[in-house]
Image (cartoon, rainbow, N blue to C red):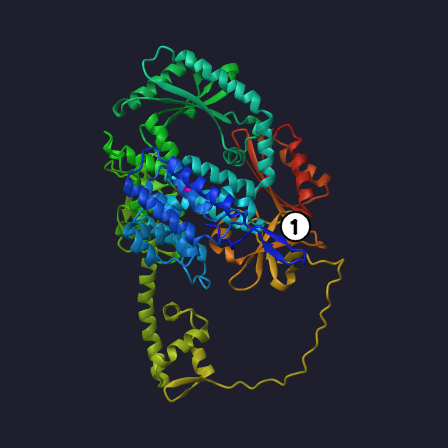
């Protein structure tokens, strides 16, 4: 939840002192009405036991939060009540989850203890509330955010309702985020897009995932959000009229079918449109599936697939389908349980329309995810009834195999469990499911850890390939092993599954321990020759040579990376200890006094960090996003000192905000005297042959902009160029973008991350 200080409506008295004014009667009415709305959100009547439990949780929460108010000014208790309503109405959870949602902040933010919760409500509710309570004493942790998020994921293994309530909590906080400061909004949005939206996607909560992404996008990219929203609004009436005509035409086609159905239109989310523009390099005007039509039908479970294809045939008998846009998620559901038959057809007036075909059951699961899926576990299709249990088992294995580092754990879970999947096969035809981006080495480790460690080469589809080759849907693999093969450091950079990473780390640590044992023997011989104790001097030598620990030092010693001759030159033996020899100190000269001139008001520093001159922080610009004067920026304090200046749209921004939010500082531009900023552009278009490079570079030259780098590739009549430009500010970079777009053979110019 968003931590907030108690707040009341405040006015001032005649003498200027603050006076608190609270309309208690209005507050009581608002709280009571909200609780009634919660009770009405249950689709089936509650029995007396559940009503009593909910009432007890409600009264305890009201009493515990009675002195607190949200930053919006409303009573704080309205937040947990609304979280409970979201759990029931929008996710489909029951009264136990609603009671936990009402209590989710009392242990963290009030005097109520977990012991009291346990005594009053029992083991199950106490477990869930504990999972929802942030860890204390994390001020010295490398990443408090990662520690708390990993705690939620660990508790989720005992009861998945923990993460579902956490999603409801985050959704309500995002809906009311306008009351927070800009910095807090960006931090919360980064956390949300980094972990909560992917969790919602994995649990099949499509509506929640879409809403979270749109709110995050609005906070992180306000200008682009407004631009797309404006364009959608301008064409809303025209597109709505078109979709209505198309739906009416479908109803005419279906008029003689012998089953119940309904047809609805749905707009594409703003974030999804933006993602398509930037990943497919497609202008807004060329995106044809801004709206999709959904056909939802009634059918017994065993008839669902047959009926979906029947509806597909009805539609394609009247409209030309686009074969490459056909997606059969019914035969092979997505890993989050999503099922649908999707196609794109050439509709009325020769305009493309996306059509989704799904049963009522499929639609329920697509909208409400895991909670809806459990309702259908008794269906006839038992082979996929435990789709979420399989996912939770993978989470469990990832956590059990983790090193204990919260940051590594989150990275492993994100890379392995929140991505799409590929299905590959063993030589015997057994199917293996791996995350998108997995390599042949990941496959080897998925079969057996020993097979992965001894992997020398791999055949994919009977063709010998490198062990780091990325896998594609339907690949068949054969692993070639060598008993003398051992994992190396570069393996870690070329696998994505947690099983592979953890096994490689373990193998490297074991190898290092063996090397350290040999190194210890070498050091022991040296200490014996000096007639001193190894144990009493080893840690001192570790520090003196600049190593982190004994294993690193002794391993480096075995590998010949440590010069032991220095010991005899720099130390002498005194009893059992080595003592550093005294070095004659040169005559110390009187230090030169440095005069530090204060900046004049008109000469502001280049960067202002937390309202202080950036020079205090020894800042530098991040090369991952190359900020240019005029960009929205922030400062990230480095562990070793100093600060890096990043663009707020940096590809790493979400990761930094989500895991190291306590090290993020505000940053703004001062007056810039130096104009060397590096901006990167990506130019795509039709390859018109000789002259492309000359025309592009001449246009940049005419603008008076220097080109730092230029790389261009062409294939099949299409080219993609990457330009590095030295610019003064974002205005100059934007002028370059607009000028390059003037070529009719250039399809898109955008700033690269």
Q: As rendered, which of 496 and 598 lies closer to the eye?
A: 598
Name the chief secondary structure element in magenta.
Answer: helix
Q: As rendered, which of 48 and 390 lies closer to the eye?
A: 48
Q: Residues within 10 Å of mark 1 (few under 14, many from 20)?
A: some
Q: Which residues are magenta?
A: 197-201
Q: Which residue is mark 1?
A: 677
Answer with the quarter of the image where residue 286 lies.
top right
**SS type, badge 1:** strand
- What residue lies at 28% left-to-right and 52% top-to-bottom? 122
Q: As rendered, which of 142 and 47 lies closer to the eye?
A: 47
Residue 318 pos. (x, y %): 42, 12
Is 653 situated above or below 638? above
Answer with the quarter of the image where residue 688 lies.
top right
Verify whether residue 597 appears in magenta: no
- What residue lies at 32% left-to-right and 56% top-to-bottom? 486
In the figure, is residue 145 to the left or right of 746? left
Residue 192 pos. (x, y %): 47, 46
Residue extending farthest bottom:
575
Q: Is residue 584 visible?
A: yes
């Amino acid at each position: 939840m968003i931590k907030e200080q108690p707040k009341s409506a405040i006015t001032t008295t005649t003498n200027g002192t603050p006076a608190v004014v609270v309309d208690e009667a209005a507050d009581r009415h608002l709280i009571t009405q909200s609780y009634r709305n919660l009770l009405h959100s249950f689709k089936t009547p509650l029995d007396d036991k559940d009503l009593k439990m909910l009432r007890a949780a409600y009264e305890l929460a009201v009493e515990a939060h009675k002195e607190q108010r949200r930053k919006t000014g409303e009573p704080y208790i309205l937040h947990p009540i609304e979280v409970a309503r979201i759990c029931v109405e929008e996710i489909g959870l029951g009264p136990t989850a609603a009671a936990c949602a009402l209590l989710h902040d009392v242990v963290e933010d009030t005097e109520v203890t977990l012991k009291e919760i346990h005594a009053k409500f029992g083991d199950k509710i106490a477990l869930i509330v504990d999972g929802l309570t942030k860890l204390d004493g994390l001020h010295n942790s490398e990443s408090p955010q990662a520690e708390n998020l990993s705690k939620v994921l660990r508790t989720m293994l005992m009861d998945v309702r923990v993460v579902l309530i956490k999603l409801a909590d985050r959704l309500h906080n995002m809906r009311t985020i306008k009351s927070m400061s800009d910095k807090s909004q960006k931090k919360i949005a980064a956390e949300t897009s980094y972990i909560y939206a992917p969790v919602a996607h994995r649990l099949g909560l499509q509506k929640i995932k879409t809403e979270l992404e749109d709110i995050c996008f609005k906070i992180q990219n306000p200008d682009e959000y407004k631009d797309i929203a404006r364009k959608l609004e301008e064409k809303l009436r025209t597109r709505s009229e078109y979709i209505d005509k198309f739906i009416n035409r479908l109803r005419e086609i279906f008029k003689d079918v012998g089953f119940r159905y309904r047809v609805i239109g749905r707009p594409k989310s703003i974030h999804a449109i933006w993602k398509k523009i930037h990943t497919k390099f497609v202008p807004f005007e060329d995106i044809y599936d801004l709206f999709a039509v959904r056909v939802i039908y009634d059918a017994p479970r065993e008839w669902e697939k047959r009926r979906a294809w029947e509806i597909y045939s009805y539609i394609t008998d009247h409209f030309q389908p686009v074969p490459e846009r056909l997606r059969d998620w019914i035969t092979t559901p997505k890993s989050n349980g999503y099922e649908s038959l999707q196609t794109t057809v050439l509709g009325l007036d020769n305009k493309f329309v996306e059509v989704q075909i799904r049963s009522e059951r499929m639609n329920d699961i697509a909208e409400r995810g895991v909670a809806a899926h459990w309702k259908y576990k008794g269906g006839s299709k038992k082979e996929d009834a435990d789709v979420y249990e399989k996912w939770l088992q993978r989470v469990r294995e990832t956590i059990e195999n983790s090193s204990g580092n919260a940051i590594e754990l989150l990275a492993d879970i994100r890379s392995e469990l929140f991505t799409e999947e590929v299905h590959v096969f063993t030589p015997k035809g057994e199917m293996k499911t791996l995350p998108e981006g997995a390599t042949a080495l990941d496959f080897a480790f998925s079969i057996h850890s020993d097979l992965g460690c001894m992997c020398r080469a791999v055949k994919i589809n009977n063709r010998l390939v490198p062990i780091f080759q990325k896998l594609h849907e339907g690949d068949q693999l054969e692993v070639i092993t060598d008993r003398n093969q051992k994992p190396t450091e570069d393996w870690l950079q070329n696998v994505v599954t947690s099983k592979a990473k953890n096994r490689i780390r373990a193998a490297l640590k074991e190898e290092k321990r063996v090397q350290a044992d040999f190194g210890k023997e070498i050091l022991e011989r040296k200490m014996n020759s000096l007639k001193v104790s190894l144990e009493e001097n080893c840690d001192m030598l570790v520090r003196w040579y600049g190593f982190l620990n004994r294993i690193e030092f002794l391993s480096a010693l075995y590998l010949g990376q440590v010069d032991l001759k220095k010991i005899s030159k720099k130390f002498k033996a005194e009893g059992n200890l080595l003592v550093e020899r005294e070095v004659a100190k040169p005559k110390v000269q009187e230090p030169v006094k440095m005069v530090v001139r204060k900046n004049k008001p008109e000469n502001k520093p280049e960067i202002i960090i937390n309202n202080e001159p950036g020079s205090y922080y020894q800042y530098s610009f991040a090369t991952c996003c190359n900020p240019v004067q005029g960009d929205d920026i922030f400062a990230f304090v480095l562990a070793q000192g100093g600060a890096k200046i990043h663009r707020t749209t940096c590809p790493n921004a979400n990761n930094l905000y989500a895991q190291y939010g306590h090290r993020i500082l505000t940053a703004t531009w001062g007056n810039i005297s130096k104009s060397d900023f590096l901006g990167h552009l990506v130019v795509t278009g039709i390859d018109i042959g000789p002259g492309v490079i000359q025309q592009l570079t001449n246009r940049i030259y005419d603008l008076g902009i220097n080109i730092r780098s230029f790389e261009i590739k062409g294939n099949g009549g299409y080219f993609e160029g990457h330009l590095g430009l030295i610019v003064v500010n974002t205005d100059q970079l934007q002028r370059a973008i607009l000028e390059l777009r003037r070529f009719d053979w250039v399809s898109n110019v955008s700033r690269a991350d």
